[in-house]
Image: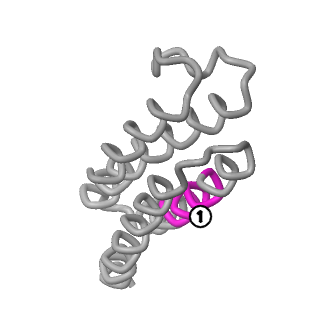
Amino acid sequence: MELCIMSREIASYVSLNKDLMRLYESNSLRDIIANSLLTDAILIPQKIAQTEFSNSNSERLKNVSFINIMIRNINSYCLGLEKDGVKETEYLNLLRAELKSFRKYYKRWKSSFR
């Protein structure tokens, strides 16, 4: 959940459009990246819940793979925001640190499904 909270705060800070529910309508690269960051951060806990409640091993593995992709995407979004000129990289670095911590627990959790 920390990833969701941090992502929402970063998106709100870096976005030119302060209506986060309408970021997808923007043509600004920064808003598009912020929207993608929010979307993936919100999907991670949903996929974790789906995985936990699934009886299908193939669905679990699919969700685990999807979460891994979203983790990589969030790192890419941070880089994209830096390339787009976000000067306050300490916020992005905080998100990266949180993502690194999450990844450690994610790997342990993921190995429990094998």
- Residue at 44% from the left image edge and 41% from the top image edge: 10
Q: Quadrant of the C terminus?
A: bottom left
Please check the rendered image and state whether residue 71 is part of the magenta-colored stretch, yes or no. Answer: yes
Q: How is the image coloured?
A: one colour
Is 44 placed above or below 29 here?
A: below
- Residue 37 percent coordinates (x, y): 53, 43
Is 24 placed above or below 93 here?
A: above
- Residue 51 percent coordinates (x, y): 34, 59
- Residue 62 percent coordinates (x, y): 51, 62
- Residue 49 percent coordinates (x, y): 28, 52
Asked whether 56 or 85 is in front, the reply is: 85
The kind of secondary structure element at disc 1 is helix
Question: Over which residues does the magenta segment extend?
Answer: 67-77
- Residue at 66% from the left image edge and 34% from the top image edge: 30
- Residue at 59% from the left image edge and 22% from the top image edge: 16
Residue 86's image quarter?
top right
Q: Main secondary structure of the magenta part?
A: helix
Asked whether 107 or 19 is in front, the reply is: 19
- Amino acid type indicated by mark 1: Arg
* Residue on which the image places disc 1: 72
Does 41 sit left or right of 82 as displayed?
left
- Residue at 36% from the left image edge and 65% from the top image edge: 98
